[in-house]
Amino acid sequence: MQTAVPLPQLYTLFLAVERIVPIQREQGEKAIRNVCTAVKIKMLKPAEMKFLAGYTAVMKPVAMALDILQGESSVHMGLK
């Protein structure tokens, strides 16, 4: 079974998003604006930040499970 995004990239994306959300919550919009300016991207809109917060809440258990499964050496799908 192929996924649209390779699993290691999906986990890395989750970790990046998970880092952005607390920065905005703890340090405010100015900190996110500085990051966006530094990497030369448009400022994230409030709706986009809200989406990212929801994304991390939903994907955290999935990301943790993927991390565990990636470390397993004897996991098989279907009949062997």
Image (tube, rainbow, N blue to C red):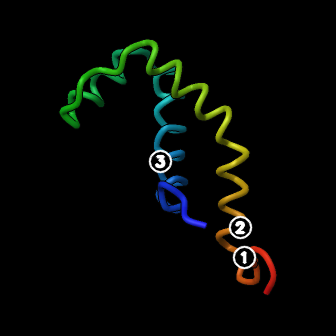
Q: Which mark is residue 12?
A: none
Q: Quick one: which residue is furthest to the left in this view?
A: 40
Left or right: 8 with respect to 66?
left
State the image quarter where residue 76 is shown: bottom right
55 shown above or below 1? above
Q: Quadrant of the C terminus?
A: bottom right
- Numbered badge on residue 72: 1
Residue labelled with disc 2: 69
Mark 3 surroundings: few (<14), some (14-19) or many (≥20) residues within 10 A = few
- How packed is label 2: few (under 14 Cα within 10 Å), some, or many (20 or more)? few
Q: Amino acid at mark 3?
A: Leu
Tell me the SS state at disc 1.
loop
In this view of the protein, which residue sits in the foreground, 69 or 76? 76
Is mark 1 in CB contact (under 8 Å) with mark 2?
A: yes
Rate crowding at label 1 as few (under 14), some (14 to 19) or many (20 or more) other CA atoms within 10 Å. few
Q: Position of residue 49 (x, y in %)?
A: 47, 21
Residue 37 placement (x, y as % from top left): 21, 27
Tell me the residue that label 3 is attached to: 13
Residue 11's spot in the image, x, y percent? Answer: 55, 54
Disc 2 element: helix
Spatial separation of the CA atoms under disc 1 and disc 3: 21 Å
Q: Residue at x 52, y 47 (%)?
A: 15
Residue farthest bottom in this picture: 80
